[in-house]
Image (cartoon, grey):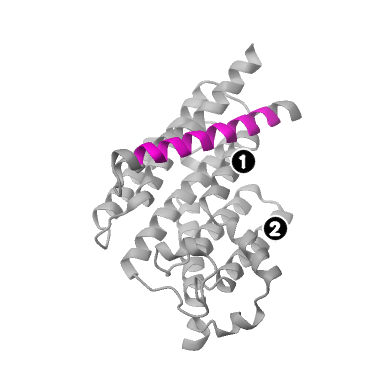
């Protein structure tokens, strides 16, 4: 059992240039850039409420994952050599790619209730998990740990239910905001290690800002774009603005508080507000012009 959970010697024998390139592309779908694009476009063009709930789930899952990594401090595999340099900055257990991709796709499948989406979601989760093994940044134990935590989170939040608190038919309730504040305060104040939570702390602020922005957009009467042209405008312009803001906010945060988390927290709050409020308001004004 120990060898099954920790031995990655089998990976080296299956590596090739083509497979390495393929799995590097696959593993990108588990990084922040993909989640920012996916959540933003889904929120703007598909469903405000469903993707608000999904954004909260991703933020909570990501924050808990970072806390657990530093709490357990489980080292990443030493052999074979890792093919993903980004992963060297953190510990292994639980796998963030496994946990957060499972959180995203399983929650989305539950929200949308489409049979074909379950196939896409499970296949995507499996590929992402396999990519982390192939790139030798996680062993099987890390992957299984991430998947198990995702299932626990989904079960807990689906049965709250989160859908009752985030709905197009009623104002945002105070309970999810209070729960998020308590949750992130608890994790930040009990963070293990000397370096503190770093940028991960901002995930709580991101979720809070998204919830508030989505409620303001609802009250302003914002609606999804109509037609291909409207969707293209809001999608392209929104994403360009998002990454311009994100890049600028991160640079300012690092200049103000190098190595700290408070300025990074503020920058992610701005990003959450931007995604949930600014493009919907801009489209509303354009539609009325």
Q: Which mark is residue 157?
A: none
192 left or right of 219 in image: left
Tell me residue 40's x, y (percent): 57, 39
Q: Main secondary structure of the magenta part?
A: helix
Residue at the image position 46 percent from the left and 87 percent from the top: 2
Q: Secondary structure at mark 1?
A: helix
Tell me residue 176's x, y (percent): 39, 42
Residue 4, relative to residue 121: is it above or below? below
Tell me residue 155's x, y (percent): 49, 59
* Camera-nearest residue between 102 and 17: 17
283 left or right of 99 in image: right
Q: Is residue 236 magenta?
A: yes
* Camera-nearest residue between 216 and 246: 246
Residue at the image position 29 percent from the left and 38 percent from the top: 256
Q: Secondary structure at mark 2?
A: helix
Which one is earlier in the sequence, the residue at label 1 or at label 2? 1
* Camera-nearest residue between 185 and 83: 83
Say which residue label 1 marks: 42
Image quadrant assignment for residue 235: top right
Q: Is residue 198 magenta?
A: no
Q: Which residues are magenta?
A: 231-253
Image quadrant assignment for residue 262: top left
Residue at the image position 64 percent from the left and 11 percent from the top: 289
Mark 1 is surrounded, within 10 Å at the Cα level, by few (under 14), some (14 to 19) or many (20 or more) other residues, namely some
Residue at the image position 75 percent from the left and 30 percent from the top: 228
Residue found at the far top of this picture: 289
Residue 46, relative to residue 8: is it above or below? above
Say which residue label 2 marks: 120
* Camera-nearest residue between 17 and 147: 17
- The Cα–Cα distance between marks 1 and 2, rounded to whole angstroms, is 16 Å
């Amino acid at each position: 059992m120990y060898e099954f959970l920790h031995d990655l010697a089998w990976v080296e024998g299956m590596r090739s240039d083509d497979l390495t390139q393929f799995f590097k592309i696959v593993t990108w779908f588990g990084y922040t850039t993909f989640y920012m694009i996916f959540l933003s476009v889904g929120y703007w063009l598909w469903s405000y409420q469903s993707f608000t709930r999904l954004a909260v789930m991703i933020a909570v899952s990501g924050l808990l994952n970072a806390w657990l990594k530093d709490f357990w401090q489980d080292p990443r595999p030493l052999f074979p050599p890792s093919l993903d340099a980004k992963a060297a900055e953190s510990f292994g257990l639980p796998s963030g790619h496994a946990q957060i991709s499972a959180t995203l796709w399983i929650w989305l499948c539950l929200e949308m209730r489409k049979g074909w989406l379950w196939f896409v979601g499970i296949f995507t989760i499996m590929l992402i998990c396999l990519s982390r093994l192939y790139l030798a940044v996680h062993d099987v134990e890390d992957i299984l740990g991430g998947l198990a935590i995702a299932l626990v989170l989904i079960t807990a939040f689906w049965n709250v239910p989160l859908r009752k608190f985030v709905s197009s038919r009623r104002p945002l309730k105070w309970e999810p905001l209070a729960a998020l504040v308590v949750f992130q305060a608890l994790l930040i104040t009990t963070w293990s290690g000397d370096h503190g939570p770093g940028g991960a702390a901002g995930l709580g602020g991101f979720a809070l800002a998204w919830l508030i922005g989505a409620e303001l957009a609802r009250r302003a009467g914002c609606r999804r774009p109509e037609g291909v042209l409207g969707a293209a405008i809001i999608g392209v312009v929104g994403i360009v603005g998002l990454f311009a803001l994100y890049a600028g906010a991160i640079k300012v945060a690092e200049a103000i508080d190098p190595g700290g988390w408070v300025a990074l927290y503020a920058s992610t709050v701005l990003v959450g507000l931007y995604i949930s409020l600014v493009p919907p308001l801009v489209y509303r004004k354009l539609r009325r012009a």
